[in-house]
Amino acid sequence: MADESTQSIVIDAPPEKIMAVIADFAAYPDWANGVKQVEILEDDQVKYNIDQGPVKDEYVLKYVWSPDRLSVSWDLVKGTMQKAQHGSYVLEPTGSGSTKVTYTLSVQLVIPMIGLFRRKAEKMILDTALKELKKRVETSA
């Protein structure tokens, strides 16, 4: 899975507030596009049910948190439509009370997809996820 897509956004909040939203998996159906149901499993694993129109999937991700809580990465444990997924969020304080959030994602589907189309889909996922995260963090109390 050498090919990956990366995108960044600046969120007007400190890293700990952003990471708290990222780590609140149970709340994802309230704000994350297409996430219909989340089940928190043992060993930092989370099961997702997503429904984004033509794309429906059920998969389990295993998360690894950095000791300083400034980054988190994940890998696919099992999936229906995916055979591999690796992603990460990296948070960098800007010094002005804001945080640069960089999201990196690589997905391999069970059904082969031309690399150009896969990267375009990943970029769309990244863009939507970062904008939704920014909105959730900046509008939460």
Image: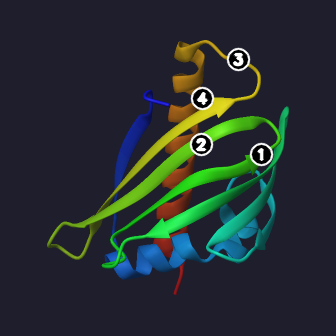
- Who comes first in sequence, dot 3 or dot 2? 2
Q: Nearer the viewer, residue 17 or 65?
A: 65
In space, the residues marked 3 and 4 are separated at their CA atoms by 13 Å
At label 3, counting other C-alpha atoms closer than 10 Å, the crowd grade (few under 14, some 14-19, many 20 or more) is: few
Q: Nearer the viewer, residue 36 or 12?
A: 36
Q: Read off the residue under disc 1.
A: 79
| For the residues bearing labels 2 and 1, Cβ distance under 8 angstroms | yes
Q: Nearer the viewer, residue 59 or 17?
A: 59
- Who comes first in sequence, dot 2 or dot 4? 2
At label 2, counting other C-alpha atoms closer than 10 Å, the crowd grade (few under 14, some 14-19, many 20 or more) is: many
Q: Read off the residue under disc 2.
A: 85
In space, the residues marked 2 and 4 are separated at their CA atoms by 13 Å
Q: What residue do we see at 35% from left, 59% from top? A: 90
Residue 57 in the figure: left or right of residue 6 = right
At label 4, counting other C-alpha atoms closer than 10 Å, the crowd grade (few under 14, some 14-19, many 20 or more) is: some
The amino acid sitting under disc 4 is Ala
